[in-house]
Image (cartoon, grey):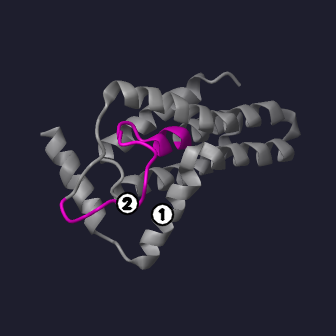
Amino acid sequence: MLQALDSRLLYAMRTRFHGPTAERIAKGLGVLGEYGWIWLAIGIVLAFIDTDNSDDWVTAGILGPVAIGVNFVVKLIVRRPRPVLEGLPPLGGAPSSLSFPSAHATSSFACATAMTRIAPEAAVLYVLAFAIAACRPYLGMHYPSDVLGGIVLGIALGLVVPL
């Protein structure tokens, strides 16, 4: 039942609200979230702005690429293949054929969570984290549950990283 719901949600996200501009934005968000580098860049910029917490900002930023590594270990354990939709090929590429959990969601929510721990006003970064995560099923790269799993793993990592 959950797999059927997951597949229906994926199909809906893959077939609705698609157009050249929306797909270009989603692809751009996918590139932005690759390997967690955007979060490292944000952490470094915030370290220069908030020098009193510079070490914490850098740590929170480094969590992006680190979360990708943790995510890959989970992928190797779970071994869920990426979705295949008849007649709807994915609109992006991926470094592996494994789907659960979404690395984009993991790194984005890990960093947004850690950064919000440093400064509550950084919660605005959850908007970017959500956009990066939501683009994955929209592009056909992940099931929605892969993204949900990545969000949960990311929040957990963001809460446990020492700051």
Q: Nearer the viewer, residue 53 or 153?
A: 153
Magenta span contains residue 94 = yes
Q: Position of residue 25 (x, y in %)?
A: 50, 68
How many tags in the picture? 2
Q: Nearer the viewer, residue 137 or 78?
A: 78
Q: Position of residue 14 (x, y in %)?
A: 29, 62
Circle 2 packing at 10 Å, graded few (<14), some (14-19), many (20+), is: many
State the SS at label 1: helix
Q: Disc 2, disc 1: CB below 8 Å?
A: yes
Quarter of the image that includes the N terminus = top left
Query: What residue does disc 1 label?
Result: 27
Q: Is residue 140 above or below residue 48?
A: below
The tag on residue 110 is none
User: How far, Cα to Cα, is label 2 from label 1?
Assistant: 7 Å
State the SS at label 2: loop
Q: Earlier in the sequence, mark 2 or mark 1?
A: 1
Q: Is residue 4 left or right of residue 81?
A: left
Secondary structure mostly seen in the magenta stretch? loop
Circle 1 packing at 10 Å, graded few (<14), some (14-19), many (20+), is: many
Q: Amino acid at mark 2?
A: Leu
Query: What residue does disc 2 label?
Result: 139
Q: Position of residue 156 (x, y in %)?
A: 50, 27
Span colored in magenta? 86-108
Q: Is residue 36 left or right of residue 149?
A: right
Residue drawn at x 37%, y 60% as measured from the top left: 139
Q: Position of residue 6 (x, y in %)?
A: 22, 46
Q: Is residue 88 left or right of residue 28?
A: left
